Amino acid sequence: MGDQEPNHEARAYRAWPVLVDCAARHSTITYTRLGQRIGGVHQRAIGYTLGPVQDNCLDERLPPLTILVVRKSAGHPGGGFVAWDIDDIETGLERVYEYPWASLLNPFAYAADETVTLDVLAEELLQNPGIAGDVYARVRVRGVAQQTFRRALLEAYEHACAFCGMTFCDSLEAAHIVPWTSCTQSERLDPQNGLLLCGTHHALFDARFLTINANYQLRHTDDTYELDQYTTADLWFTRRLDGCQIRLPQREHLRPALKYIEKRNSA
């Protein structure tokens, strides 16, 4: 990749089978040795390689695979390891050794081509949502697909909740209009089947307290509670938004497709 920043996802792609092999052998590996095994990566940079692996295990609720990478002097993971209680290494190791890792796909297979990252795939979706099915076939793993989808929506909605405008990035989530379980593979990554929402409005949207119509207006519906049960905060997050226009991407080809809105509202 020339003088560009290293592709840590490509390095994670190479590290994954090494760690899976260690798990099968009930063994650990040092930072230095792992760096050598994946192409001469300096031990000080291995943390950047392990970050995506650790995140994937946390997102997918897998045992902490990166627990197998240890400092030679101490025999346990370094300070960047947060996927398990460092004071209970033995239980973490046992969970990793017992897990059937060979049954899983390498979640970083998309980065076998070292020019490819999730940001690159997200940008491809933004340029042409019609290739969503092809992108899904390349990522394959649900957690990786959802990360790609979120990155695309962050850019499309300029890092702001489509309902309330919140811009705290850690609170922003990728919401599907037609739910994941009801989608085709292509629809799962189609930006036109998505909304960038803060965590609260994502939950309210999924629970159908808030919906959107064909005019991109928010509608508040509640068959569970009476309005006199609402707190001021409840009203602020729901009732006050009834009839408001949602915030839309500037690029028209990324705006929610009416076919998805109609499918959701008719379900």
Image (cartoon, rainbow, N blue to C red):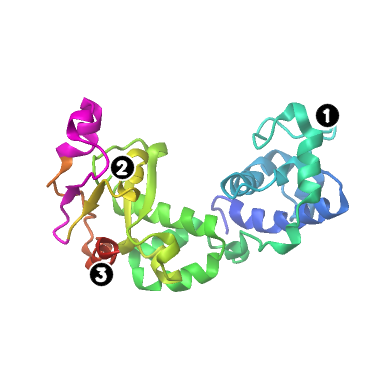
Q: Residue at x 38, y 51 (%)?
A: 174
Query: Along the horizontal axis of the image, is 236 left or right of 97?
Result: left
Q: Position of residue 253 (x, y in %)?
A: 25, 66
Q: Residue at x 18, y 58 (%)?
A: 213
Q: Which quadrant would residue 128 be assigned to in this image?
A: bottom left
In this rendering, the label closer to the viewer, 3 or 1: 3
Q: Which residue is mark 3?
A: 259
Q: Which residue is mark 2?
A: 201
Count all numbered tags in the image, as a single digit.
3
Query: Where does the C terminus fall, quadrant-wise?
Result: bottom left
In the rendered image, is residue 30 in sight? no
Q: Give SS at disc 1.
A: loop
Task: Tell me the kind of residue under disc 3.
Answer: Lys
Q: Give SS at disc 2.
A: helix
Question: What is the distance, in whole Å, between disc 3 and disc 2 at their CAs?
Answer: 22 Å
Residue range highlighted in magenta: 214-240
Dot placed on the residue nearer the N-terminal end, 3 or 2: 2
In this rendering, the label closer to the viewer, 2 or 1: 2
- In this view, the residue in front, 17 or 26, is 26
Magenta stretch: includes residue 225:
yes
Task: Tell me the kind of residue under disc 1.
Answer: Ala
- In this view, the residue in front, 5 or 167, is 167
Magenta stretch: includes residue 76:
no
**The disc label shown at residue 74, or none:** 1
- In this view, the residue in front, 31 or 196, is 196
In the rendered image, is residue 266 in sight? yes
Q: Residue at x 39, y 38 (%)?
A: 171
Query: Along the horizontal axis of the image, is 266 left or right of 244?
Result: right
